[in-house]
Amino acid sequence: MKFIPHDYQQYAIDFIESHPTAAVLLDMGLGKTVITLTALNDLLFDHFEISRVLVIAPLRVARNTWPQEIGKWEHLNHIRYSVAVGTEKERRDALRKQTSLYIINRENVPWLVEKNDFTYDAIVIDELSSFKNWSSKRFKALMKVRPLAKRVIGLTGTPSGNGLMDLFAEFKVLDMGVRLGRFITKYRQDYFKPDKRNGQVVFSYAPLPGAEERIYEKIADITISMKAADHLRMPELIES
């Protein structure tokens, strides 16, 4: 199938290509996967800026969605990929293949980092909100190798599903703490105040006045955000 990008899709493609660190916050249905693959295709085979891409995604998305999208679009026929899911042997065999793009499920990121050489110069995190927990094994593992990749792309439609606190880890894994800081305690101190608490034990935090605007201003240079309602044209509603 021939891919003719909508204006907003072309804007997102250009944004990824021109930003080594990119947070692409697009609603479901706007084509995050084909947008990213198109940008990667250009960076791999037109600009020669990258040579080995690691895609980290939820298991079903890693196994089905990315391969299906690569096979669906005519302009992506140069991309060779390998899906590293399943048993350890299956994963190792997949990583040994000589391809441009390697796809792994997010649960196996610690295994990938600890048991294999990290030789990828670009990382795509499909569902960036999967890395919102700064104390999780997958977050800590990815942070160890993040400096080795010269490009990183974070994709999600729900970057702050549980509030602005989620953004700290999600953006640290992208820019290594440049914009929102390296430490969660400093992030809390700068943008939040204790909310629910019992004596010295704080159960939750509430944003300080103006915190949302200040946070968005900090991350604006590497972020694009689009809502489906603003870009998808639906047929006229017919009530029966």
Image (tube, rainbow, N blue to C red):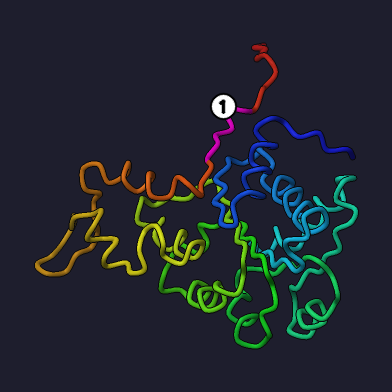
Q: Is residue 74 left or right of residue 22?
A: right
In the picture as drawn, the residue positioned furthest to the bottom comes out as 115
Residue receiving disc 1: 230
User: Looking at the picture, does residue 3 appear above or below residue 161?
Assistant: above
Which residue appears at 62% of the width and 44% of the height?
A: 15
Q: How many neighbours does mark 1 have within 10 angstroms: few (below 14), some (14-19), or many (20 or more)? A: few
Horizontally, residue 218 falls left or right of residue 11, namely left
What residue is at 58 percent from the left and 80 percent from the top?
110
> With respect to residue 8, does 77 lie above or below?
below
Where disc 1 sits, the SS reads: helix
Answer with the quarter of the image where residue 5 lies. top right
Closest to the observer, 89 or 122: 122
Q: Position of residue 34 (x, y in %)?
A: 74, 46
Residue 81 vs residue 148, the one in the foreground: 148
Residue drawn at point x = 49 percent, y = 65 percent:
173
| Quadrant for the N terminus in the image | top right
Residue numbers of the magenta segment: 225-231
Residue 17 screen position, x and y as percent: 67, 50
* Along the viewing direction, whichever of 192 and 5 lies nearer the viewer: 5
Amino acid type shown at disc 1: Asp
The single residue placed furthest to the left in the displayed view is 199
Q: Position of residue 38 (x, y in %)?
A: 76, 48
Residue at position x 31%, y 45% from top?
214
Classify residue 28 as left or right of residue 1.
left
Residue 55 located within the stretch drawn in magenta? no
Residue 182 image point, x, y percent? 36, 68
Q: Quadrant of the C terminus?
A: top right
